[in-house]
């Protein structure tokens, strides 16, 4: 009697899928993630965007994060083992998921940006962008001529978004996000020149490296670091550019939203798993040995 068994299996699978689908249903009251290709629009509207960091080359955890309700995935190639090959696997595994993938490349280099974009990343994060020249290079690396210097070869990227290669060019012009990280004293000294570069979508503060550069060695809340943060925020307001900040907790994100930030790198999949485990275990009422009864 295969018919009833198949029907039962189908119903079970459908019921199992309900909780995952419900988080994207407006009737649940949960915040809906940005639609694919709308990060730029969301930033222009002033809507805070929160991204999960993908730190390890595992497609299962990447897909789980992409379906968890975050606006974007921050795929981490600078601090971690993700290679160009594993980046490709993550981008393919998360095709169709609500979170939009952007990639922090290991260095501000045009060829690295080109590889990340051609694989399907819809934005590039450029570390250690401490001068106007590096900011201009970042923008140019993400734009096709005559606007920039990106070479044409988006076969995989076009396929990921269901486009013909010729249609992808306009899609990329409208949607590829350019994020530059200021994380050195010289970047703070040059902040007006950096932020005023046309084409930059987000100026992101690399708080830890900035604190080291300013002499506080990881004390990101030190007054000298906060003064630099305020200087970056003021420049972003002046030039109409979104300011970003790394924030691992809801309290930190809320604090920085009130301060004026709208783009956040949240914790990575490992820290989220660890925090979830701690939250679960902390709520379990474990009996003491005397309450548990005699051992057999």
Image (cartoon, rainbow, N blue to C red):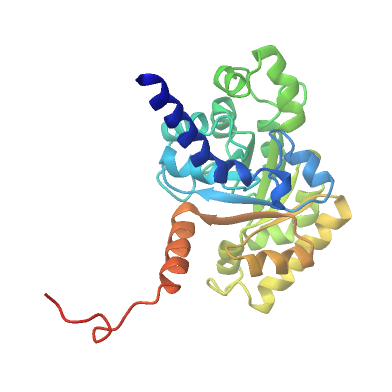
Horizontal relation, residue 174 to residue 284: left or right: right
Relative image position of residue 89 (x, y in whole percent): 45, 31
Q: Where's residue 176, x and y in %? A: 70, 33
Q: Among all residues in the image, which is located at the extreme left?
A: 296
Residue 170 vertical placement versus 234 (above, below): above
* Quarter of the figure that contains the N terminus: top left
What residue is at 40 percent from the left and 45 percent from the top? 81
Tell me which residue sits at (75%, 43%) in the image: 201
Q: Is residue 276 visible?
A: yes
Q: Quadrant of residue 282?
A: bottom left
Q: Quadrant of residue 136?
A: top right
Q: Nearer the viewer, residue 54 or 228?
A: 54
The image position of residue 128, as x and y in percent, is: 60, 51
Locate residue 24 relative to residue 215 in the image: left or right: right
Please name whichever residue, 226 or 266, is drawn nearer the observer in this view of the structure.
266
Q: Position of residue 142 (x, y in %)?
A: 67, 31
């Amino acid at each position: 009697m295969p018919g009833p068994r198949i029907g039962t299996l189908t119903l079970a699978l459908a019921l199992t899928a309900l909780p995952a689908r419900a988080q994207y249903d407006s009737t649940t009251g949960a915040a809906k993630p940005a639609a694919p290709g709308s990060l730029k629009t969301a930033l222009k509207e002033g809507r805070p965007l929160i991204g999960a960091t993908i730190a390890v080359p595992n497609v299962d955890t990447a897909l789980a994060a992409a379906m968890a309700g975050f606006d974007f995935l921050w795929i981490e190639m600078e601090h971690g083992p993700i290679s160009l090959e594993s980046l490709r696997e993550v981008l393919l595994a998360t095709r169709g998921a609500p979170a939009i993938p952007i990639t922090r490349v290991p260095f501000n280099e045009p060829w690295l940006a080109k590889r990340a974009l051609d694989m399907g990343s819809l934005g590039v994060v450029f570390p250690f962008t401490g001068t106007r020249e590096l900011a201009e290079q970042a923008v140019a690396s993400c734009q096709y001529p005559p606007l920039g210097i990106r070479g044409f070869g988006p076969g995989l990227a076009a396929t990921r978004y269901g486009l013909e290669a010729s249609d992808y060019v306009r899609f990329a012009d409208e949607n590829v996000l350019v994020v530059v990280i200021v994380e050195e004293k010289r970047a703070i000294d040059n902040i007006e020149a950096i932020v005023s570069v046309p084409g930059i979508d987000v100026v992101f503060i690399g708080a830890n490296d900035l604190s080291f550069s300013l002499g506080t060695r990881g004390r990101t809340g030190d007054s000298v670091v906060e003064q630099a943060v305020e200087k970056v925020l003021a420049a972003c307001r002046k030039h109409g550019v979104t300011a970003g900040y790394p924030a691992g907790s809801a309290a930190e994100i809320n604090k920085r939203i009130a301060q004026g930030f709208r783009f956040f790198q949240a914790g990575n999949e490992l820290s989220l798993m660890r925090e979830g485990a701690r939250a679960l275990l902390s709520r379990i009422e474990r009996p003491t040995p005397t309450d548990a009864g005699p051992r057999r």
